[in-house]
Image (tube, rainbow, N blue to C red):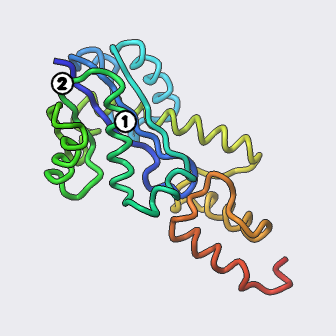
Amino acid sequence: MMRCGVDEAGRGSVMGPLVVGAVFAESDVALLEIGVKDSKKLTPKKREAMYGQIIDSVPGWSVSIASAADIDRLRKTCSLNEIELRMFCDAVSKHPADAVIADCPDVNETGFSARFSAALGGAKEITAKHKADDTYPIVSAASIIAKVTRDRMMEDIRREFGADIGSGYPSDRDTMQFIEEWIRKNREAPKEVRCSWEPVRAMLSGRYNTKLSDW
């Protein structure tokens, strides 16, 4: 039976894309030999090495990518969970699979599984679990595909700006300082920043409430 593991990277980031990765395999044997685990528990160098090993050892893999602009546009009409669900459907539909195992982004595993199944027309067996990237090797592999893809895109963004933009997450001081300084100088958010995120909205709303000496 062909199974598919699916996971995301960049869901909570304020800058850069949201990436969903999917890996297709009939067995976990090759993935276990590679030593896959939750991508957050691996160094960047190890993730890069495993990325190549994964795509060379499985019959199929895919990614679905939403830019910051895509997310801002879609959030006007739907929640982040719904955006992610659409991306999950896109990624898992790129190769035949009988069953899908997903790292659940919703607090309600049962509800998300039902919506996921309905969105796919009920044609696949769906399992959506919290921390699936830590307990199912095929989801761990998907998390690595998603994370490496996002990391490479963040590196492209870093080169484009020629500055230290950090990891892209709101908890990263370098990221938030870069965005704040950019808005102060340019009176708009940098490209690749999610303007629908509250910290950025607050920065943008305060851009005209500054003293002349700030400029």
Classify mark 2: residues with Cα within 10 Å, few (<14), some (14-19) or many (20+).
few
Rendered view: 154 above or below 47: below
> Residue 192: x percent and y percent?
62, 51
Measure the alpha-carbon separation of dots 1 and 2. 15 Å
> Residue 51: x percent and y percent?
45, 24
Q: Amino acid at mark 2?
A: Asp
Answer with left or right where residue 119 lies relative to residue 146.
left
Q: What residue appears at the point 39 percent right and 19 percent down from the top-left corner?
A: 54
Are discs 1 and 2 less than 8 Å apart at CB? no
Identify residue for label 2: 98
> Residue 65: x percent and y percent?
48, 39
Q: Nearer the viewer, residue 173 or 57?
A: 57
Rendered view: 97 above or below 14: above
Q: Earlier in the sequence, mark 1 or mark 2?
A: 1
Residue 50, quarter of picture: top left
- The secondary element bearing badge 1 is classed as helix
Identify residue for label 1: 90
Q: What residue appears at the point 27 percent right and 43 percent down from the top-left corner?
A: 103
Residue 80, quarter of picture: bottom left
Q: Amino acid at mark 1?
A: Asp
Answer with left or right where residue 153 lies relative to residue 198.
right
Classify mark 1: residues with Cα within 10 Å, few (<14), some (14-19) or many (20+).
some
- The secondary element bearing badge 2 is classed as loop
Q: Quadrant of the N terminus?
A: top left
Q: What residue appears at the point 36 percent right and 13 percent down from the top-left corner?
A: 57
Rendered view: 46 above or below 134: above
Q: Quadrant of the C terminus?
A: bottom right
Q: Nearer the viewer, residue 118 or 195?
A: 118
Instruction: Name the disc covering residue 31, or none.
Output: none
Count of numbered labels shown in the rendering: 2
> Residue 96: x percent and y percent?
27, 21
